[in-house]
Image (cartoon, grey):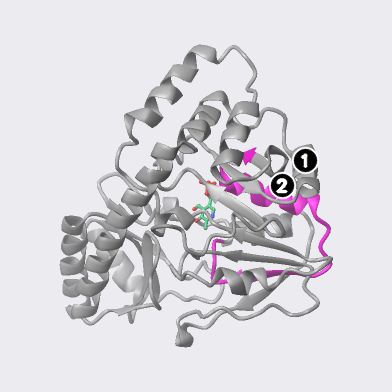
Amino acid sequence: MLRFHGDAEVAPGLVDLAVNVRQERPPSWLTDPIAASLADLARYPDPAAATAAIAARHGRPAEEVLLTAGAAQAFTLLAQALRPRHAVVVHPQFTEPESALLTAGHAVDRLLLDAADGFTLRDPPDAADLVVVGNPTNPTSCLHPAARIASWVRPGRTVVVDEAFADTVPGEPETLTGNRDVVVIRSLTKTWGLAGLRIGYVLGPAGLIAELRRHAPLWSVSTPALAAATACASPLAVQTERTIAEGLTADREHLVAALRAAGVEVAGRPRSSFLLIRVAGGTRVREALRARGFAVRRGETFPGLGPDWLRIAVRDTATSDAFVAVLSDVLGG
Ligand SMILES: Cc1ncc(COP(=O)(O)O)c(C=O)c1O
């Protein structure tokens, strides 16, 4: 079940609260260069300019950046390039890192965080030579302190932070993109609604980035995806990202307040574009929601969670209100 993802919950006619990709159309300063790049498709893609743009956006040298076909590809490359003796994945989290490690033949230990304390971060065992954590974490929506994650760095250990949703938090207070000792994975598919384009990147020490590049399939990031990366690295993009994150925060607070007013348990302190709820009889509730037109993400495929946990994407307040009304009805019935 590690390869089950929210897209499997969605079907025509359902309101999609299962996939954490923003649904608004990307701005024209983003779609125009993507469209213009189609004139160039006869040429093999050259990632140099986009890599330089992403490096400049994060104040890093280009040798510390690798563009990937979505953040997802980065997990596969890391699993292929690294030879961990004791890999630890902090759960519950996105399952692709663990899946990639297992597929590459590595054993994986799980560090399970606890719902009882709001999924507060705990430290990995000393013997761990690879640690993977999400921040903010999918599906809990918890934002962990960057300093705590940075404190895990030591010689012989690789610390990987999946920051696919970092840009959903206004100002990115806990990002580790400026820390040259950790490996940070970022996605451009969520906020920018580009899941079908496949574009993300890795920031990390130059030696490791060179090793990941050696494992990457030739030309795996397409010319339109490179055009998107360049556009998303501009000051306008960074400013827009913040404005989107601020609007999202307000929408999320509205949803959290409505859920709690309806007596629904919301896990921890949500900080990203989704949140986790716990309801009795989760499977029945999820199926009833589906019958009433809402697709939500089941929790039981995430290590550490069970079927009573459901992940809900934050949408506009009208959609959230309609959802909470139906959920209240389902829970009351
Ligand atoms: C936490 C997390 N990391 C990474 C990814 C992969 O993102 P991308 O579309 O950039 O491959 C996802 C996608 O759902 C995710 O939830």
Circle 1 crowding by C-alpha within 10 Å: few under 14, some 14–19, many from 20: some
Is 298 on the left or on the right of 131, as rendered? left
Q: Quadrant of residue 127?
A: bottom right
Q: Tag count in the figure?
A: 2
- Provide the residue span drawn in magenta: 67-94
The residue lying at 68 percent from left, 41 percent from top is 61
**Residue 215: image tag:** 1
Which mark is on residue 116? none
Q: Residue at x 47, y 69 (%)?
A: 143
Residue 53: image quadrant is top right
The residue lying toward the viewer, choosing from 290 and 251, is 251
Residue 225: x and y in percent read 53, 31
Q: Is residue 80 left or right of residue 237?
A: right
Q: Where is residue 174 in the image (x, y as percent from the top left)?
A: 51, 64
Q: In which quarter of the image is the C terminus?
A: bottom left
Residue type of the residue flagged with mark 1: His
Give the secondary structure at mark 2: helix
Q: Earlier in the sequence, mark 2 or mark 1?
A: 2
- Give me the residue at 68% from left, 73% from top: 151
Location of residue 225 with respect to 186 vertically, above or below: above
The quarter of the picture where residue 65 lies is top right
Q: Mark 2 points at which residue?
A: 77
Q: Are marks 2 and 1 in contact (CB under 8 Å)?
A: yes
Residue at 62% x, 70% y is: 149
Q: Which amino acid does label 2 sit on?
A: Leu
| SS assignment at label 1 | helix
Q: Does the beta carbon at disc 1 come under 8 Å from ligand 1?
A: no
